[in-house]
Amino acid sequence: MQIDTDGLIIKEQNIGESDRLVTVLTRQEGIVRAFVRGAKKLKSKSASSTQLLCYSRLSIYKGRDKYIIDDAHPEEVFFALRQDIEKLSLAQYFCELSLALAPENGEAGDFLRLMLNALYYLANGKRPALLIKPVVEMRMLSMAGYMPNLICCQECGTYEADVMLFLPRQGVLYCKDCYSRTGQSGGAGMNRGVTTALRHTVYADFNKIFSFSLPDSGQKILSGVSELYLLSRLERGFATLDFYHHLFP
């Protein structure tokens, strides 16, 4: 069966002397692993369009036990990401995250859209990296079924306070008074701005999820909170995230 779809290359692996195995986040088929024959040859038409972080129009043959990319045409190669180590390391982290959370053999249009928007803003410097990261983490987790409850204090129902605490393991909010009174622990403290931003990453309309701002201090807190929730919920680490923190502690 022949499949014509668009997709983002989120992982690549050389096979033998000339072939390549790629993992693609596609709109209609979700995560697909496909072979690209002769991709490493200098004259290969598929070489540039099947490399990591390339968004391409693909013609994929679906066999009984494997996929083969017959033809590929690049739509966006995100060249600017390869010129900045921070942007590149974050982009690779986003790819590993999508590989863990996006569905296989199923519709994944929202995952692809989120990735493409994030890479666009990251490549063009349209948004700070520390704002893009929590948006990707929190929205991708929510789409995968790990949406936290950020509506109000879990105990008293308070919507807004000067300090709210987010409990990563439970995925809920507590106001400062209830947090102290009930003897909770492990909460991450957030001021009003960070609390609002965290809610935005989960509940905002898709077209507006990157449209907010925070001071540098707030960005660091938001990024840290979203990362704590991610690692707690998935109960695993990410090599690309470790590499990012090694470069930018």
Image: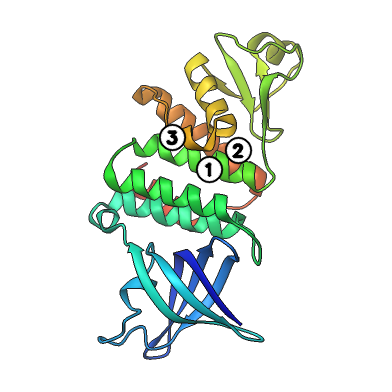
Q: Please tell me which residue is depicted at 66% across the width and 67% down the height of the picture.
A: 105
Who is closer to the viewer here, 192 or 9? Answer: 9
Which mark is drawn over residue 137?
Answer: 1
Tell me if residue 108 can be seen: yes
Badge 2 or badge 3: first in the primary sequence: 3
Which mark is drawn over residue 210?
Answer: 3
Give, as a three-letter code, the residue at label 2.
Answer: Tyr
Give, as a three-letter code, the residue at label 1.
Answer: Glu
Who is closer to the viewer here, 173 or 205? Answer: 205
In the image, residue 61 sits, relative to residue 159, either above or below, namely below
Who is closer to the viewer here, 234 or 122? Answer: 122
Who is closer to the viewer here, 182 or 150? Answer: 150
Mark 2 residue element: helix
Residue 72 point in image, percent of width and height: 40, 75
Q: Nearer the viewer, mark 1 or mark 3?
A: 3
Q: For mark 2, what is the residue?
A: 229
In the image, residue 70 sits, relative to residue 180, either above or below, namely below
